[in-house]
Amino acid sequence: QVQLVESGGGLVQAGGSLRLSCAGSGSTFTRYTMAWFRVVQGKGREFVAGINELVDWREYSDSVRGRFTISKDNADGTVYAYLQMNSLKPEDTAVYYCAATKDQITQNDLRYDYWGQGTQVTVSS
């Protein structure tokens, strides 16, 4: 069964850090583009960061560039995508989702084939 499972969310003070993890199993995610999106309550899904390891390419939204870092790793048949979030702000509060696509990195969430269940990140001021 193909699935993505996120972990690492929580409550943190402004200026703090969190590291989100996404474990992909059940398919060959090794060659997939992995990305993180977030949903702020009352708003639509927003692209945060994406990584295409095959071409060593990463993209970030303007709101997180310089503060967040996306990375990818493979271990024991499982693909992991990480989102290191530093200098967190209250406006980063959202549910964060991991996603995967066979395409190049895109901010269009409709192009992603697989999604995790989401993990809540809350940043207090």
Image (cartoon, rainbow, N blue to C red):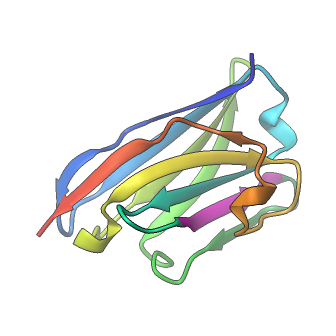
Q: On the rendered structure, is 24 left or right of 20?
A: right
Which residue is found at the position 30% from the left and 62% from the top?
93
Q: Is residue 66 above or below residue 74?
A: below
Q: Is residue 8 above or below residue 66?
A: above
Q: On the rendered structure, is 11 left or right of 23?
A: left
**Residue 45 vs residue 99, the one in the foreground:** 45
Residue 122 spot, x, y in % from top left: 24, 55
Residue 75 spot, x, y in % from top left: 67, 25
Which residue is found at the position 51% from the left and 35% from the top?
117
Instruction: Check the picture and name the quadrant holding the N terminus.
Output: top right
Q: On the rendered structure, is 116 left or right of 99?
A: left
Q: What main secondary structure does the magenta stretch of the protein show?
A: strand
Which residue is found at the position 46% from the left and 75% from the top?
64
**Residue 113 vs residue 28, the one in the foreground:** 113
**Which region shows up in magenta?**
45-53
User: Can you name the residue that lies furthest to the left here?
Assistant: 125
Q: Is residue 79 above or below residue 40?
A: above
Residue 48 spot, x, y in % from top left: 55, 66
